[in-house]
Image (cartoon, rainbow, N blue to C red):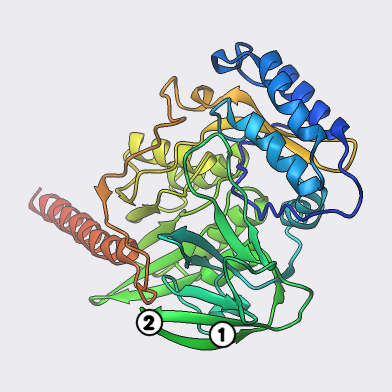
């Protein structure tokens, strides 16, 4: 099954393994990429020459982590999204549970490095970090007393080695053992926060995000879809429309971060195309909205379903497939040009710019969300416009 997914969709930790790394892993990744990469011209690169360049380095790798890093450097030469080698642990302990909507113990936030500091970028709604008071924009200074940059608990949450975007990071949970974070919510003012990991998934976080926001006398439904990977995400949105949002004036559909599959993407689009939701809607996107979410944004804007607000999306739009390798690791490889989903429009390396671009500063932002706030104001305008149009139509009917 072909999935339009993303290497950034899951926590792609690359932990060192005890056994000696196998060069066979490198060879399989090279061979599989050559056989299945969507562009048979390999983006103009000499794939045999790249093997000759990187294989000696891979043979010298002392750990599985090092071997995977070297392999990904080779893959990165193709400058393509959705092309990454994942470790056995990353694939089996993080990706597969998420694909099955299985909760696993997590601290519950993603962070990004800015000017040498690690800042919280997104937080699982209802997760342990949120419960402990961690907010977007907080700087993680130390973890269990060790500098965040040196802590063995900090793992890369995945990246496309061929794209220029900095990777996301997360704090690895060791079962449900509590983690003490030294946090700065204001520059230079730190505090200790104890977070006890709990089992949670992106699906549960999406469900937890469902709420009704009151804004200037109006009621807006809000849901944050963490990814478009599995059917329960669609079901969460659909159920909220029929229940919690039934008496709302409009909808804020937040698709910031990660990617997904075309199946869930089309199912959610269908809710608007068929009139299952016939009230105003504003779409929230950012520069980490990837893959299927970018195609969703493109279609949403092309079909004039509502205004899009936020940041230009990431530009990672290739149809990909998972290829498990013999050692248990997994290669994610692009097998389809994303333009087949966008009537020829190229989004790879370009992204989609929303109708309204909003500045979105992160460091020490104390949880403030400029995109959401702008979205609420924009939705208010849309609701008033629709109500005014309905009032005019009513008067015309009465006059006739």
Question: Is residue 390 visible to us here?
Answer: yes
Q: Answer with mark 1 or mark 2, whichever residue precedes in sequence.
A: 1
Asked which quadrant contains residue 324, the reply is top right
Is 241 placed above or below 4 here?
Answer: below
Q: Which residue lies at the image location 92% right of the left edge and 50% below the top edge? A: 19
In the displayed structure, 330 sits above or below 13; it is above
- Residue 285: image location, x then y, percent: 40, 51
| Residue designated by label 1 | 132
- Residue 64's place in the image compared with 197, above or below, is above
Q: Residues within 10 Å of mark 2 (few under 14, many from 20)?
A: few
Q: Position of residue 108 (x, y in %)?
A: 61, 70
Q: Position of residue 40 (x, y in %)?
A: 64, 12
Q: Is residue 86 visible?
A: no
Direction from residue 45 to residue 201 in the image, left or right: right
**SS at mark 1 in the image:** loop
- Assign the N terminus to one quadrant of the image: top right
- For mark 2, what is the residue? 188
Q: Is residue 83 left or right of residue 400?
A: right
């Amino acid at each position: 099954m072909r999935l339009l997914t993303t290497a950034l969709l899951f926590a792609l930790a690359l932990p060192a393994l005890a056994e000696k790394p196998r060069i066979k892993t490198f060879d399989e990744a090279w061979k599989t990429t050559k056989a299945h990469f969507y562009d048979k011209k390999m983006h103009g690169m000499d794939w045999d020459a790249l093997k000759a360049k990187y294989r000696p380095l891979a043979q010298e790798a002392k750990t599985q982590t090092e071997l995977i890093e070297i392999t990904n450097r080779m893959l990165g030469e193709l400058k393509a999204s959705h092309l990454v080698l994942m470790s056995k642990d990353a694939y089996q302990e993080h990706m597969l549970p998420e694909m099955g909507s299985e909760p696993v113990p997590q601290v519950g936030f993603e962070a990004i490095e800015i000017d040498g500091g690690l800042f919280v970028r997104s937080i699982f709604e209802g997760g342990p970090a949120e419960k402990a008071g961690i907010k977007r924009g907080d700087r993680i200074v130390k973890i269990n007393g060790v500098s965040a940059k040196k802590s063995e608990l900090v793992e890369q949450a995945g990246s496309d080695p061929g794209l220029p975007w900095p990777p996301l990071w997360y704090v690895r949970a060791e079962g449900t053992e509590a983690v003490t974070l030294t946090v700065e919510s204001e520059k230079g003012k730190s505090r200790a926060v104890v977070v006890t990991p709990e089992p949670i998934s992106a699906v549960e976080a999406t469900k937890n995000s469902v709420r009704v926001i009151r804004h200037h006398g109006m009621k807006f439904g809000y849901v944050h879809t963490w990814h478009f990977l599995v059917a329960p995400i669609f079901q969460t949105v659909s159920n909220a429309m029929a229940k919690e949002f039934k008496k709302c004036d409009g909808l804020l559909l937040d698709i910031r971060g990660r990617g997904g599959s075309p199946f869930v993407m089309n199912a959610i689009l269908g809710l608007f195309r068929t009139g299952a939701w016939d009230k105003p809607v504003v779409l929230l996107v950012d520069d980490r909205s990837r893959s299927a979410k970018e195609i969703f944004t493109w279609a949403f804007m092309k079909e004039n379903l509502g205004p899009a607000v936020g940041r230009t999306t990431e530009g990672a739009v290739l149809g990909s497939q998972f290829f498990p390798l013999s050692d248990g690791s997994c290669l994610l490889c692009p097998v389809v040009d994303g333009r087949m989903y966008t009537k020829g429009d190229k989004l790879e390396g370009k992204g989609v710019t929303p109708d309204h671009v909003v500045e979105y500063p992160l460091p020490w932002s104390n949880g403030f969300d400029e995109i959401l706030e702008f979205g609420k104001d924009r939705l208010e305008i849309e609701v008033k416009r629709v109500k005014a149009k309905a009032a005019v139509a009513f008067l015309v009917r009465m006059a006739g």
